[in-house]
Amino acid sequence: MLKTTIGVIFALISYASALSQQAPRNAAGGTAERNASGSLRQIIPGYYAYTSGSFNSGVIATSEGVVVLDALNSPAVGRAERQAIASAIEAPVRVLVSST
């Protein structure tokens, strides 16, 4: 079970990396703010991809709660993702795995 879960996590991260693009920069050199709306799409039962603009996040529904891979780019996008998860998956977010 653990090897399968790790494999699926790796696949979701690879999928999200392949879809993501570098965020545009604003005139001050910082990252431009993105619209907070996005969509949660089921890849296979229990495994989802959340997409907001060029940012992507993996979502895994387990019996103990939801695992989210990548915190995305802003608190507004994170809130929109949590709302989408709450609407589609009737389990609380238990773990966030993010490099930022």
Image (spheres, rainbow, N blue to C red):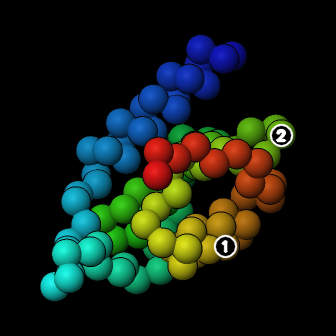
User: Which percent across, then down, holds residue 73?
Assistant: 43, 66
* Residue at image coords 58%, 43%: 97
Q: Is 80 on the left or on the right of 39, as rendered? A: right
Residue that label 2 marks:
64
The quarter of the image holding the N terminus is: top right
- Amino acid type assigned to the residue bearing label 2 in the image: Glu
- With respect to residue 28, does 71 lie above or below? above
- Disc 2 and disc 1: Cα gap in Å? 19 Å
From the viewer's perspective, tell me whether residue 33 is left or right of residue 46. Answer: left
What is the count of numbered marks? 2
| First along the sequence among labels 2 and 1 | 2
Residue 68 falls left or right of residue 98:
right
**Is label 2 in a helix, a strand or a loop?**
loop
The picture places residue 35, in percent across and down from the top left corner, at 40, 83
Q: Does the rendering let one see residue 69?
A: yes
Q: Amino acid at mark 1?
A: Gln
The foreground one among 59 and 75 is 75
Q: Can you identify the residue that label 1 sits on?
A: 83
* Residue 75: x %, y % from top left: 55, 74
